[in-house]
Amino acid sequence: TPTPGTKKIIVEAISGGGGSRSGSTASGQTGGSTPGYHGQYNKSRYDLTAITTPLTVTVGAGGTAGNYGGATYFGPYMSLDGGNPADGTLSSSGSGIAGSAYHRTGAANTSAGFILSSSQGETLSTPIIQVTAGTACGFSAPNSPFPGGWQGRGADGIYAPNATSYTGKTGNPGMVIVWEFS
């Protein structure tokens, strides 16, 4: 519900980040889980005369292990899909192996307002790379496009030493900020 006298608003929102996956490594192997993807981001301006208030705001939760992040909605005026879960797990006793691709497109990111900034349906995750057994990198999820990079960030991947079972992590929740202007 807007404050009396408000004529325009800017809504800045992100959906929940995706979770990383659970897995295991066999005896003599190391590896781990790739990180989850960040949620969709949108910052849009609205003329309050074009919005029916009050309206419901839904903030997406972070995706649990192996699951999508929750969608974020600003009434019927903005809809943002949650981040994808991690692509998978990797384990090997050898060298020169790498995780899967890190770029996804096509997620819902819509706004009925004037879009000031948007992730445009794209989301990112880093692949894990194992050079030799016991030497690997790429488990940290990239920052989200939301200012500060923490809200809506995907879950970090997990490094798994020799003969280990592990449980994926939960992505970070989304957020909605509404700026009012008279």
Image (cartoon, grey):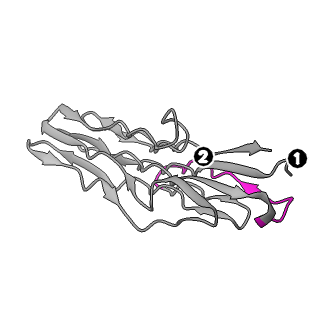
Q: What amino acid does circle 1 point to?
A: Gly
Q: What amino acid does circle 2 point to?
A: Gly
- Crowding around mark 1 (Cα neighbors within 10 Å: few <14, some 14 to 19, many 20+) is few
Is residue 101 in the magenta section? no
**Above or below, 62 relative to 140:** below
| Residue drawn where x is 86% and y is 58% of the image | 54
Residue annotated with mark 2: 174
Percent x, y for residue 95? 8, 41
Q: Nearer the viewer, residue 91 or 27?
A: 91
**Above or below, 108 relative to 174:** below
Q: Would residue 168 be seen by someone viewing this image from the given angle? A: yes
Upstream in sequence: badge 1 or badge 2: 1
| Residue drawn where x is 40% and y is 41% of the image | 166
Percent x, y for residue 134? 18, 31
Percent x, y for residue 58? 71, 55
126 lies left or right of 18 = left
First to last magenta residue range: 50-66
Q: What element carries label 2?
A: loop
- Crowding around mark 2 (Cα neighbors within 10 Å: few <14, some 14 to 19, many 20+) is many
| Residue drawn where x is 72% and y is 50% of the image | 9
Residue annotated with mark 1: 5
Residue 182: name its quadrant. Answer: top right
132 lies left or right of 123 = left
